[in-house]
Amino acid sequence: MREINGKDYHFVQEYTFKIMSKMKSFRFEEQFNDWKYGTSTSHWIQAKIFIFPPFVVKSLSPEEREESCIMYLNIDEKVRRKRLEKRKDADSVERRLNADSKDFADFSEYDYLVNNPFFCAKDIATLLQAQLDKWEKK
């Protein structure tokens, strides 16, 4: 599975990224290896679903956290290893698993835990609808 520019991500040239960073155009940004990732403030305001590492979740303000529904996909390492090996990404399987182990150690800032490796979109939609219903009752 390859990421598609404009759909999965919005790829920009490195100099554009640097300018956006200097102009404080990102709500969140990070770098690891030679890769840089940023979520623009405008995207943060408009989008409904994000995939973020724990450090972003921990940086949310109390108001942002209250308005968020954090779903933690804690799938068994053996299953994740098989899936990563099938992807054949530029990233190494071992590096990714080690980073995940470190990043998600003691992670508890979530509303829903999904640890069933056979979950489907319908399962996620049901959980999200339950959260929307809960918010509407407030």
Image: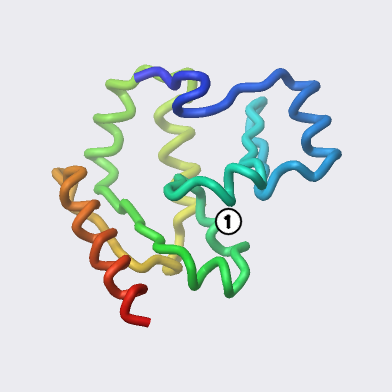
The residue under label 1 is: 55
Q: Residue at x 40, y 66 (%)?
A: 110
Q: In this rendering, would 103 be left or right of 27? A: left
Q: Quadrant of the C terminus?
A: bottom left
**Looking at the image, is 136 positioned above or below residue 28?**
below
Farthest residue, direction bottom: 138
Q: Residue at x 44, y 50 (%)?
A: 48
In the rendered image of this protein, does residue 1 appear above or below residue 127? above
Q: Residue furthest front?
A: 136
Above or below, 8 relative to 117: above
Q: How many marks?
A: 1
Label 1 sits on what residue type? Phe
In this rendered view, identify the residue nearer to me: 126 or 31.
Answer: 126
Q: Quadrant of the N terminus?
A: top left
Q: What percent of the width, then of the height, locates residue 85?
A: 31, 24
Q: Is residue 8 left or right of residue 18?
A: left
- Asked where in the image residue 37 lies, by quadrant, the reply is top right
Find residue 21 and report its horizontal and vertical position in percent. Answer: 79, 38
Dot 1: few (<14), some (14–19), or many (≥20) neighbours within 10 Å? Answer: few
The residue sitting at 67% across, 37% down in the picture is 31
Of 103 and 112, the residue lying toward us? 112
